[in-house]
Image (tube, helix red, strand yellow):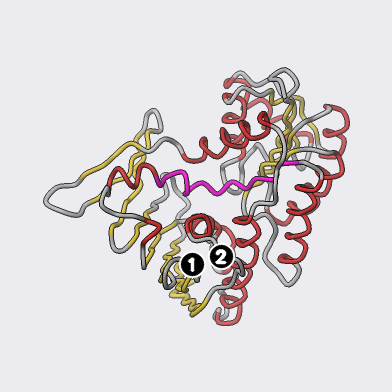
């Protein structure tokens, strides 16, 4: 696909809920494509989103209807950065129109239908020769992590821990944040038959949850603990590590420079981390340009199963008020 032909529309570029839509639009643009349109819940919000992108060199037409945008703009790809409850509809529209898709996570709201419906969507995109990618970025931090801890081999790890700070609360925290550790672990430890063991969810409050499980991959399974603490202000804390070697994310402004830092040892050490979200976008653009085949992603399919398992257990044990 030539650069001239690669036309992209963005749903949710105003970034009210999660704050990623505008970043995805800019990263798609700087990757060399043409962001030609944005869609919002109303014409006013769509125009607001389009106006905010002008300073990044993006001249996008505003729409209040995603279907109309797809037809009018003759798109090649759709970026879905709208709330999760809207994803299924927009994915179906993109599939019918033959568009490649980069979707914000989770791909579908985890419920009793999400595994079967999500799997059908993943396989349907592959069958039509279309790329379906999900914005789960932490696997792209592995290179920097291994620079920070050169003696650690993540694929040989027996334990994994992560701290994340979603804007949401209660059960919504899990749907919002858990795709990140799941995608990283399912990438490192692929399994033929997805399924987690020893799931334990503790809500210390609606704003703090501890989630533990055993991932079946690796030599004997990987013990996992994820701490979720609501935080609405930027930059939101994040950290991850294998076998007790924890890297904490640091963000410096101006310039939005990202680092991974370790406080272990006699002195703090840190290494630069190229923006992993931008890495997701660049990978998406590169794969579309390369062309088919676009096989169904086993990490995405495993993630559907694993997220459903974790959220189902959380819903079972959540105290009154545990919902988001």
Q: Quadrant of residue 29?
A: top right
Q: Say what secondary structure mark 2 lies in.
A: loop
Task: Look at 61% across and 48% down and name the residue there.
Answer: 17
Q: Is residue 3 left or right of residue 152?
A: right
Tell me the crowding category of disc 2: few under 14, some 14 to 19, or many 20 or more residues within 10 angstroms, Cα based: some
Q: Residue at coordinates 86% horizontally, 39% vertically from top-left?
A: 97
Which numbered disc covers residue 92? none
Image location of residue 234, percent across then percent down: 43, 45
- Which SS class for mark 1? loop
Q: From the viewer's perspective, is residue 58 above or below residue 9? A: above
Disc 1 target residue: 217
Q: How far apart are the two marked residues, 2 and 1, measured between alpha carbons?
A: 6 Å
Nearest the eye: 185 or 18: 185
Q: Quadrant of the N terminus?
A: top right
Q: Which residues are magenta?
A: 130-142
- Residue 219 quadrant: bottom left
Say whether residue 165 is left or right of residue 87: left
* Labelled pair 2, 1 in contact (Cβ < 8 Å): yes
In the foreground, 157 or 73: 157
Q: Is residue 185 one of those drawn in magenta? A: no
Viewport quadrant of the C terminus:
bottom right
- In the drawing, what numbered circle is on residue 191? 2
Left or right of 252 on screen, residue 98: right
């Amino acid at each position: 696909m030539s650069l001239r032909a690669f036309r992209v529309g963005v749903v949710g570029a105003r970034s009210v809920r999660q704050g990623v839509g505008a970043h995805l639009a800019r990263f798609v643009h700087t990757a060399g494509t043409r962001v030609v349109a944005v869609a919002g819940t109303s014409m006013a919000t769509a125009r607001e989103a389009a106006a905010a992108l002008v300073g990044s060199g993006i001249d996008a037409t505003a729409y209040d209807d995603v279907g109309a945008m797809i037809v009018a703009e003759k798109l090649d790809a759709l970026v879905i950065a709208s709330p999760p409850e809207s994803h299924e509809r927009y994915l179906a529209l993109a599939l019918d129109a033959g568009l490649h898709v980069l979707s914000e996570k989770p791909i579908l709201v985890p419920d009793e239908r999400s595994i079967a419906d999500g799997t059908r969507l993943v396989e349907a995109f592959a069958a039509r020769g279309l790329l379906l990618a999900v914005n789960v970025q932490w696997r792209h931090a592995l290179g920097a992590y291994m620079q920070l801890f050169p003696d650690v081999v993540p694929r040989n790890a027996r334990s994994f821990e992560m701290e994340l700070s979603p804007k949401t609360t209660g059960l919504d925290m899990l749907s919002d944040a858990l795709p990140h550790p799941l995608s990283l672990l399912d990438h490192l430890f692929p399994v033929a038959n997805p399924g987690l063991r020893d799931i334990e969810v503790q809500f210390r409050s609606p704003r703090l949850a501890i989630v533990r499980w055993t991932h079946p991959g690796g030599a004997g399974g990987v013990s996992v603990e994820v701490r979720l603490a609501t935080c609405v202000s930027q930059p939101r804390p994040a950290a991850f590590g294998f076998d007790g070697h924890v890297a904490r994310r640091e963000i410096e402004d101006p310039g939005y420079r990202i680092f991974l830092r370790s406080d272990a040892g006699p002195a703090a050490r840190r290494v630069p981390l190229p923006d992993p979200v931008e890495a997701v976008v660049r990978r998406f653009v590169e794969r579309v340009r390369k062309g088919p085949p676009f096989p169904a992603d086993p990490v995405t399919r495993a993630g559907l199963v694993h997220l459903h398992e974790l959220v189902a257990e959380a819903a079972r044990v959540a105290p009154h008020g545990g919902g988001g």
